[in-house]
Amino acid sequence: MVPRTLFGAEHEEFRKSLRRFFAEEVMPHHERWEEQQHVDRAIWNRAGDLGFLCLTIPEEYGGMGADRLYSTVLMEEQTHAGASGVGFSVHSDIIANYIYNFGNETQKQHWLPKMASGEAIGAVAMTEPGTGSDLQSIKTRAVKDGSDYIINGSKIFITNGYLSDIVVVVARTGDSGEGSKDLSLILVEAGTPGFTKGKPLKKVGMKGQDTCELFFENVRVPQSNLLGPKEGMGFIMLMKELAWERLIIAILSIAGAQAALDMTLEYTRNRKVFGKPVASFQNSRFKLAEMKAEIGIGQVFVDRCIELQLKNKLAPDAAAAAKYWTSDLLCKVVDECVQLHGGYGYMLEYPIARAYIDSRASKIYGGTNEIMKELIARTL
C-alpha cells in the first residue's frame, strides 16, 4: 500500500506515549465504564497531567500549541485501542476550538487552562429532540433580561454532557423562530440554576462514553457569556468548524477500519477450521485483500484532507465526502470482520464485537450520511 508521509519522528514518539496510556491506564477500566455509562472523571485529570488534552491550543492557555497532526495521532491511537468511552476529541478539538477561535480574552483565560488540565470538561449542545441534523430548526431560546440571557429549551445526544462543566449552547437569540440568522453560541456552566442533566442515555454501542439530555429552564447567564462579537453569528461559527469536525469522524472511521482488519488478520491466521487457518481459504484471502485495498484508498484520501486542513484549505464538500465514505466503509469492514470471526465475532469478549456495536453511530453523528450526500450534491 501507499506509505503514509504525514508524520515526523516527533509525532511517532507522541504516538508511543499515547499507546502506552490507552493500553495501561484506559482499557483496563473500560468494561467498568461501559457498565456505569460514563468514564471516571479521574481519567480526564490524568490525560490533562500528561498533556493529552487541548493539543492545538496555544501554551499561554495551557495547551501544547501543536498542529492537528498531533490530534490525528491521538484519535488513531484511541481508536486502535478500542477506547470508545473517552470523549477527548469533542472536548479538545471542537469545544476548545470554539472558545479559542471565537471567545474573548476573559473567556479564553478562564476556561481553556481548565480544559487543558482536565479540571473542566467541555460539551457542545446542538441537537434537539425532533430536529436531528437540522440546525436551522433549533427551538432553544435565549431572551435578554437586563444584562443577562434567560435560556429555555432542551438538547439531546450530547457527548460529554453528563460530566460536562462548560457547555457551548446553540440557542436562538432573535425572533425569526427558524432559519440560521439568529442563532448564537452561549457558554453555560454546570451548576447554573435551571440547568439540569439527564442520566446517560442507554445506547446500542459506545456505552462507556457519556451521552445525555440537557435541560434549560429559565437558566440565567450574563450576556458576557456570548461567544463571538455579536448575536446571530452562531451558524457562521458552526460552519467554520464543521469541516474539521467531519474530518475528525473520517480519521476515526478509517482508523477503526484498520484496527478491525488488524485484529481479524491475527484471528484468521491463528484460528483453524478443517485443519487449516481461516486465512488460508481463498474466500478469506479475497475478503481480507478487498478490505486492505479499500482501507488503503480511504486512508490516502483522508490524509490528503488532513494536509488541506493544515493549510486551512479543506472544502466542506471534501470533508463531507470523507465523513460519509469512510464511515460507510468502517461499517462494511467491521461487518465482514465479524463474519470472518464466525460465532466468536458475536461475543462481546472479542474486540471485533465491541467494534461492531460502536461503529454504527459513525454514519449518524456529525450530520447523517444522507446530509453529507446532500451537501456534496449542492456543489454539482
Image: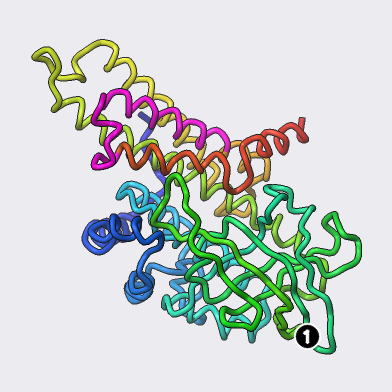
In magenta stretch: residue 333: yes
The kind of secondary structure element at disc 1 is strand
Q: Which residue is mark 1?
A: 148
- Which of the 4 image quadrants contains residue 190? bottom right
Name which residue lies at 42% across and 44% down. Answer: 358
- Which of the 4 image quadrants contains residue 64? bottom left
Q: Residues within 10 Å of mark 1 (few under 14, many from 20)?
A: some
Compared across the picture, whether 24 is left or right of 369 comes to left
Residue closer to the observer: 7 or 20: 20
Q: Position of residue 158 (x, y in %)?
A: 57, 60
Residue closer to the observer: 1 or 294: 294
Compared across the picture, whether 188 is left or right of 260 comes to right
Name which residue lies at 25% across and 39% down. Answer: 350
Q: Position of residue 292 (x, y in %)?
A: 35, 26
Residue closer to the observer: 120 or 353: 353
Tell me which secondary structure the magenta stretch mostly adopts: helix
The amino acid type found where label 1 is placed reads Asp
Residue 302, above or below 264: below
Point out the residue furthest to the right here: 175
**Quarter of the image with the C terminus in it:** top right
How many marks the image carries: the answer is 1
State the colouring used for the structure image: rainbow
Compared across the picture, whether 138 is left or right of 196 comes to right
Q: Position of residue 273 (x, y in %)?
A: 14, 17
Q: Position of residue 211 (x, y in %)?
A: 51, 59
Q: What span is in magenta?
A: 324-351
**Quarter of the image with the N terminus in it:** top left
Name which residue lies at 47% across and 49% down. Answer: 203
